[in-house]
Image: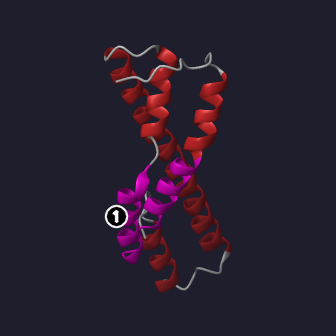
Amino acid sequence: MLAITALPVLGRILVDLRIQGTPTGVIALSAAAVGDGVAWTVLAVILATSHLSGTGQMATTAGLPPGQAMQVGALMNCRGVTELVIATIGVQYGLIILVLVAVTTTRATGPLMRALLRRQPAPCSEPVL
């Protein structure tokens, strides 16, 4: 299991000391689990935001208007098949968080694009080469 705070190590120590069912053990493990969940969520948001803004900035530099640049950034946030294959391999080694991040950011791409498209005027009908 991938952990920010060494949650598996804490669990093993509690089991070895046979205090996992005591108030101290339960509180320690619960606090570590909540802390890890919050930390991974914050990390996922930071990564998605940096990917979105970094790609959006590059698209702006390439000459796209800011609205379209943000759309490119949102589309690039979609993880795709390659990352899911790598994440699936990671699951075999207990790295489930990779799958959760990949699926969550991929699922967020559609709603994010719909929100960005609502804020922009209708696109021109001419194809862009």
Instruction: Tell me where residue 128 appears, x and y as whole percent.
Output: 40, 23
Return the residue at label 1. Answer: 86
Magenta stretch, residue numbers? 79-107
Is residue 103 rendered magenta in the image? yes
Tell me the SS state at disc 1.
Answer: helix
The quarter holding residue 50 reads top left
Say above or below: 91 vs 17. Answer: above
Q: What coloring was used for the rendering?
A: secondary structure
The residue depicted at 62 percent of the width and 65 percent of the height is 30
Position of 113 with respect to 127 (left or right) is right
What residue is at 47 percent from the left and 62 percent from the top?
A: 99
Does residue 15 show up magenta in the picture? Answer: no
User: Percent x, y for residue 5?
Assistant: 44, 59
Residue 111 location (% of width, % of height):
64, 40
Please report the residue visible at 36 percent of the width from the left and 75 percent of the height from the top: 93
Q: Residues within 10 Å of mark 1 (few under 14, many from 20)?
A: few
In this rendered view, identify the residue nearer to me: 32 or 59: 59
Instruction: Kindly indicate the quadrant of the structure image that contains residue 115.
Output: top right
